[in-house]
Amino acid sequence: MDVNRNIDSFLYPINRYYGDVKPENLAFNHNLQEFTQRTSLICALETGGKLSPEEAYQQIKLLWQELKASKKSLRVNEN
């Protein structure tokens, strides 16, 4: 049993995707899950006093911009 693999799967769980299975949807779902995990970590660091509220806000804002860009580049929900 690989300890690092167990820690990674605990800290960064990847949930099953139940939507319309297309490559762009799967890629965006992965990006969305990564966004939520990183946002949660930033919030925990801010709550614990390791990041200032402004630093946390700026980091989350950057992550949001990256997520929006990935949605646009993957052309998710375009007809």
Image (spheres, grey):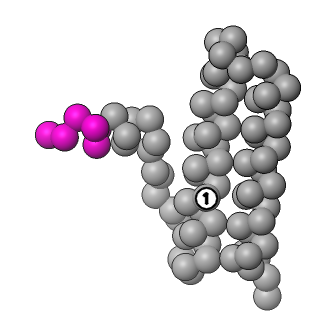
Please state the extent of the stretch shown in magenta in the rendering.
Answer: 1-6
State whether residue 21 is above or below residue 31.
below
Residue lying at 73% horizontally and 76% vertically, measured from the top left: 73
How far from the left and from the top, in percent, is residue 59? 75, 38
For the N terminus, give its image quadrant. Answer: top left
Residue found 76% across the figure and 29% down from its top: 56
- The answer to whether 3 appears left or right of 70 in the picture is left
Residue depicted at 56% across the width and 80% down the height: 22
> Can you identify the residue that label 1 sits on?
31
Q: Residue 51, how many percent across, how many down?
A: 71, 20
Q: Quadrant of the C terminus?
A: bottom right
| Amino acid carrying mark 1 in the image | Asn
Q: Quadrant of residue 38?
A: top right
Could you say where residue 58 lies in the image, as x and y percent from the top left? Answer: 82, 37
Residue 10 in the figure: left or right of residue 36: left
Name the spot of residue 5 as percent of width and height, x first. Answer: 28, 43
| Residue lying furthest right | 54
Question: On the picture, is 4 further left or further right than 13?
Answer: left
Q: Residue at x 79, y 61 (%)?
A: 68
Badge 1 marks a residue whose secondary structure is helix
